[in-house]
Amino acid sequence: MKTNVDEILKSVPVSKINLTAKDFKSDVDVRWCAGCGSYAILSQSQKVMPDIGIPKEKVTFISGIGCSGRFPYYMDVYGFHAIHGRALAIATGLKISRPDLSVWVATGDGDCMSIGGNHMIHACRRNIDINVLMFNNEVYSLTKGQYSPTSRIGQVTKSSPLGALDDPFNPITLALGSGATFVARGFDRDTKMMNHLFKRAQKHKGVSFVEVYTNCIIYNNKAFDEFTSKDTRKEHTVNLEHGQPLVFGNDHDKGIKLDGFKPTVVSLSNGEYGTSDLLIHDEKDSTLALILARMADNPELPRPMGVFQSVERPSYDEKVEWQINNEIDKKGEGDVETLLRGEEYWQVD
């Protein structure tokens, strides 16, 4: 028996569009530790949803295991709490089967970069049209403080009492190298930037990967302080704005200049260099995006924040839909019962 999915979807009630952030708050008590950066991500997600103008029934959040795994319970939309590392695989399947949905993934640095690393790579490679919010606190928090794939060398944790020996993943370079078409970084204390990045992610057609530096007050407190504290962040971060020079510093007196392919810090206060000498950010330049991403590996350079890359490439779900429709045009609608029976079959009465 054939099922007309489109007809079924037409009968599903759809809520009003003129919603508020309150409409996206569930009645489940939020159970993160006081001071956790996840609260800020949740708040901005709830604020962004009304602005993107999509009915609640068309939005879904999928999570894996970890502190970020609780996210779907706190958003009053459809959600799925998956097993460890499999959120991106489930999100991929959902988007292919329901391309009309706005699919979001809430994941952590352990869930996404470790057991879910393979799914992360292939979701980016396929360019599936989903929005991935990766909470990066550089530690396994839910399991009580083991080191994660993004923990820094020497970081003392319950599973690395003498200091972590692994070279950490750089999530931005991993996403770019895997083929993600929208890649960005923000942090929990900058709610305005998070709001902007989440909106940009939703508007982008293709995979959107947003890394969010998230403070874990219990097991890795103040890990990102030099990049997120009001007193130090202007000296240690540089905001990426398309078409604008890379200027930073408390007095906007420093800039980033390219020496070949190598970013270097120059002073703007002594007259030797001006803004015209500086690197101009271009979101469409994939080579530049990788250069900027690698700045995080050099402690002498400021940490870039904002959109590294936003380029266009056909999304996987679009290609799947085209392939199916193309076969239907050539061969007509399929019939599952006929397919299962095959050309020869026995019928027992």
Image: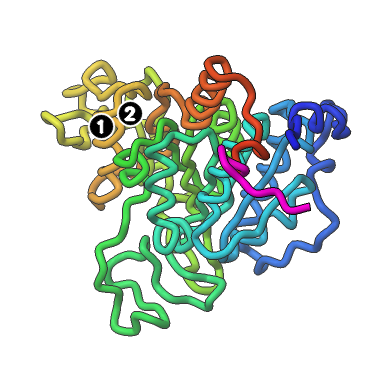
Mark earlier in primary sequence (1, 2): 2
Main SS, magenta region, reads loop
Disc 1 to disc 2: CB gap under 8 Å: yes
Image coordinates for residue 76, horizontal then vertical, percent: 79, 48
Image coordinates for residue 26, horizontal then vertical, percent: 81, 52
Circle 1 is placed at which residue position?
256
The residue nearer to you, when weighing 287 against 236, is: 287
Residue 343 within the magenta-colored segment of the rendering: yes
Magenta highlight range: 341-349
Residue 246 is marked as: 2
Q: How is the image coloured?
A: rainbow
* Secondary structure of the residue carrying numbered label 2: loop
User: Callout 2, which amino acid?
Assistant: Leu
* Secondary structure of the residue carrying numbered label 1: strand
Residue beneath the point at 30% across and 74% down: 164
Q: Report crowding for label 1: few under 14, some 14 to 19, many 20 or more residues within 10 A (C-alpha).
A: many
Is 30 situated above or below 26? below
Instruction: Indicate left or right for 243 with 220 as reference.
Output: left
Q: Is residue 21 visible?
A: yes
The residue nearer to you, when weighing 220 against 26, is: 26
User: Callout 1, which amino acid?
Assistant: Ile
Q: Is residue 50 visible?
A: no
Indicate the quadrant where residue 191 lies.
top right
